[in-house]
Image (tube, coloured by chain):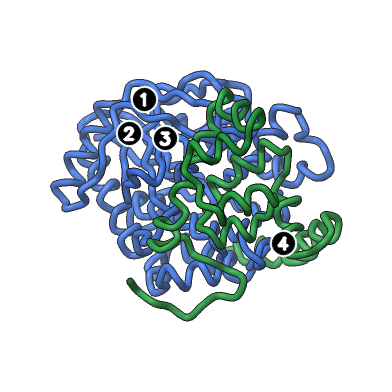
Amino acid sequence: MSKILGSVSTSHIPSIGKAIALKLQQDAYWKPFFDGFHKVHSWIAEQKPDVVVVVYNDHGLNFFLDKMPTFAIGAADSYATADEGWGIATIAPVAGDPKLSWAIIESVVEDEFDVVTCQEMLIDHAVTIPLQLLWPDQVPPPVKIVPVCINTVQHPLPTAKRCLDFGKAIGRAINAYGSNQKVMVLSTGGLSHQLDGERAGFINAEFDAECLQALINTPEDLTRYSIHQLVELSGTQGVEVLNWIVGRGILGARAEELHRNYHIPISNTASAIQVLQAV
Amino acid sequence: MTTHHSIPGTVPFGPAEAMKGYALNRMCYSFNADDCRKAFLADEEAYMARYHLNDQQKAAVRARNVLQMIAVGGNAYYLAKLAGIFGLNMQDIGAQQTGKSVDKFKAYLQSFASKNEMVMKGGKNV
């Protein structure tokens, strides 16, 4: 059976991509953020994942408002990147694992999560930046991916409870999958930030702290919040924490927090990193 | 449609905005392609007409005014592609929407940094 190792969750702020391209990791502004990945790198080196399930939201590269799936799962053998319009460099395509993708799709649909399946899917900065952060010297990274895209763009968004349950269903699918692959979860986005409106620049460190704490072993606590409350507490784009909630669901009942980094500000965002080991 | 109490300075992008802003967001989505960005820059009016923007949407784009664009249904994720054409980053956009100078807006973001330690310490397993 395949084994779920744990998860890395990280912000996916576009300007990180520019900082990587310009090699600004040691720059005073960026160092507190990039230094947060040293422990992530050693954990990954020790765990050696084969496959990464990436839970993220698309920002208008693969999906537009013409067709906006609530949950979509990639089932391709390769995922290309493309121009997103504002200058971030594209990277080489990332290998997929269609067999695992379809095993997850079959299992979650059986579990009544009627996902959209994508045999062609462009991945945007919400996938590529975290992969570059985790494997800075290896592009493409030495893993296969299964992209899981959550609608955090157009309301109605899936509820926090639905997201947690969806994650649990993916976790059951991986646990039942007959391979000896080691699977890591990578959840991206957040934490609190708001790009639009007169409240632009909104950040809520207290709520982020509550989320980080709950994500360890009491993610159900976050399901009491409505989407509207999550927007109010974390910002219009802070709702990307839904991706983290899905990712946490995949891990199963118990997890141990091995590492956390939290740094305000990166661009307009409270950046965060959390490593949870499944126990 | 579900109604909620309003969040000051915040427009969650829901069904009303999705319908109202469709043409504007569709135009912004096209800016993923370099030739579309060039076509917009070459003839902005013709490009907006091609995407059937209404008069309010055209006015918001002409004014380069993000709050106006949101009022006519613009979504942040797509508007970012338009902002990119003009070389504006998220601090420029934030400053414009909050009526601050870019330096003041950056200082506002920086003011939250005093909370970093609190959140880090919350992580200690006690």
Q: Check the image and report above or below for A123 versus A202.
A: above
Kind of residue at disc 2: Gly
Q: In the image, are marks 3 and 1 on the same chain?
A: yes
Q: Which chain is blue?
A: A
Mark 2 crowdedness (10 Å alpha carbons): few <14, some 14-19, many ≥20: many
Kind of residue at disc 3: Asn
* Residue, disc 1: A96
- Viewer-proximal residue, A67 or B24? B24
Give the Cα distance between marks 4 and 2.
35 Å
Question: Mark 4 or mark 2: which is in front?
Answer: 2
- Viewer-proximal residue, A179 or A99? A99
The x, y position of residue A249, in whole percent, is 35, 55
* Callout 2 secondary element: strand
Q: State which chain disc 3 sits on.
A: A
Give the Cα distance between marks 3 and 1.
16 Å
Q: In the image, are marks 4 and 3 on the same chain?
A: no
Give the Cα distance between marks 4 and 1.
36 Å
Mark 3 crowdedness (10 Å alpha carbons): few <14, some 14-19, many ≥20: some
